[in-house]
Image (tube, helix red, strand yellow):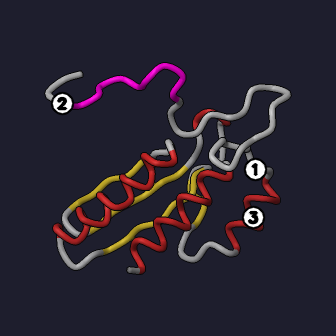
Amino acid sequence: MHAGFVVAASPGATHNGAGAPPGQEVSPMQAKKLTDDEVQQQLSSLQGWTLAHGKLHREFTCKDFIAAFGKMTQVALVAQSMDHHPEWSNVYNKIVVDLNTHSVKGLSNLDFQLAAKINDIFAS
């Protein structure tokens, strides 16, 4: 710990959604790599997101920096609860989000779940 913050994950914690070990069922919060057909099917029902360089990609524009930072904070809390973290950047009122799952080396169910939750946050 450093200044009240945890700087390392707890034992057994995963980053960016770990897949289930061989022979074990995948729970809703575990990453399942999607096939190209599954990606296209889910992408068609996910408003505003595109594929870019093998990742789900979307850009958002907010009223100002404070609004953008507030939305990012909301997303951060959801992402942490899922143990699935976005690649993102922020410049003033613009936020760029890319999602993929490192543990499965591609797109997973978690990417689409987080993308839908991000859409809900930015719609509110």
Contact between labelled residues 3 and 2, with CB atoms less than 8 Å apart: no
Answer left or right for 33 relative to 82: right
Residue 60 occupies quadrant: bottom left
The magenta stretch is 5-13
Contact between labelled residues 2 and 1, with CB atoms less than 8 Å apart: no
Amino acid carrying label 3: it is: Gln
Query: Does residue 15 sit above or below 64 in this rendering?
Result: above
Residue 26 occupies quadrant: top right
Q: Quick one: quadrant of the C terminus?
A: bottom left
At a point 58% along the width and 36% down the height, the residue shown is 102
Contact between labelled residues 1 and 3, with CB atoms less than 8 Å apart: no
Q: Which residue is mark 3?
A: 40
Answer left or right for 98 relative to 72: right
Query: Does residue 34 sit above or below 3 in this rendering?
Result: below
Answer left or right for 37 relative to 114: right
Q: Quick one: quadrant of the N terminus?
A: top left
Q: Identify which residue, 20 or 98, lies in the foreground.
A: 20
